[in-house]
Image (tube, rainbow, N blue to C red):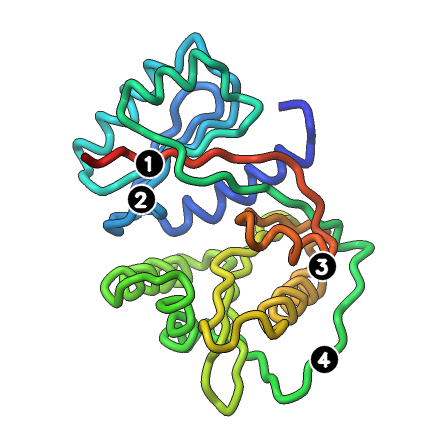
Amino acid sequence: MKNPLIHLFYQAEDYFFRSISEKFLDLENQTTVYYTGIPSDNFNLLIIKEDIPDIIEGILASGTIFFKENPVPWSIVIAEDCLTEVTKNNIKQYGFFCSDVTVAMFLDIRIYDMLANMPNLIIGDVNNKLDHWAQPLLQAFESTTEITNQYRNIHYNALKKAKKFYHFSCYQDENPVASLTLTINEGVARVDDVGTLPFYQNKGIATYLVHYAIGEAKRLGATSCFLEASASGLSVYQKIGFQPLFKNHIYNLKLY
């Protein structure tokens, strides 16, 4: 992993997922398993960070054994540059298929310019009101009440463990309409959980909220910020100033 920015991306990612996980397992060659216990493959991951065709079968076997002992849906996340034909074939043999491609992104906070305030919007630090933070996420990610409540609870536990998590919600008419999570570790920030109620989407609210979080990260001493963008969010984050680093391929277990 020669690119120092990619190293920092994984550092920020690892801090976030270790903080919300009940269990985690470090395997060979920068590969880690994260288990949150939430019954969704979005929250239980085997993340592969290196080109490992010679040991990929052993890595997949270890991940499979781990999740058989801790039965929840899970996903494999692997950087595009690491996807050799050998690796693809091994992943396919374990019954996984590529369901999504995301983009790891970077922003240099030192040269970041804050967006002007939007009228009629109030942003609050809701670390003490995680119910408010969770409300927009339920509909934004088309989740279930059970999964959203479990996700809220593991964020609450991360705060109890004094992890540097900052939860923000944007309000309109005193109702939370958008939320996100900011984490900071050793001067490196990461943005997660950016979600807006469907009725309020495409109005610039999430963009303003991300700008606000970056401003808070800068105020708290962070010098760089990372996130993982979906295809639909890529252009939005580029307009904010984030630059693409690499692509991740997300593999889910194929169900017949």
**Which of the two discs, 3 and 2, labels the residue nearer the N terminus?**
2
Q: Quadrant of the C terminus?
A: top left
Query: Residue 117 shows which numbered tag?
Result: 4
Amino acid type, label 1: Asn
Q: Nearer the viewer, residue 201 or 224?
A: 201
Which residue is label 3 attached to? Answer: 240
Q: Which residue is mark 2?
A: 41
Amino acid at pointer 2: Asp
Mark 1 touching mark 3, by CB under 8 A? Answer: no
Who's the residue at 63% across and 72% down the image?
A: 204
Q: Secondary structure at mark 2?
A: loop
Q: CA distance from mark 1 to mark 4?
A: 40 Å
User: Against 235, is 41 above or below?
Assistant: above
Q: Nearer the viewer, mark 1 or mark 4?
A: 1
Q: Residue at x 18, y 39 (%)?
A: 71
Tell which circle, 1 or 2, labels the residue nearer the N-terminal end.
2
Q: Residue at x 33, y 58 (%)?
A: 154
Count of residue discs: 4
* Local crowd size for mark 2, using a 10 Å CA cut-off: few (<14), some (14–19), many (≥20): some
Q: Are marks 1 and 2 in contact (CB under 8 Å)?
A: yes
**Residue 142 falls in which quadrant of the image?**
bottom left
| Earlier sequence position, callout 4 versus callout 2 | 2
Q: Secondary structure at mark 1?
A: strand
Query: Farthest residue in the front direction?
Result: 256
Tell me the kind of residue under disc 4. Asn
Q: In 3D space, how far apart are the residues under numbered discs 1 and 3 (Cα atoms)?
A: 30 Å
| Residue at 34% from the left image edge and 64% from the top image edge | 152
Q: Nearer the viewer, mark 1 or mark 2?
A: 1
Q: Which residue is mark 1?
A: 252
Residue type, numbered disc 3: Ile
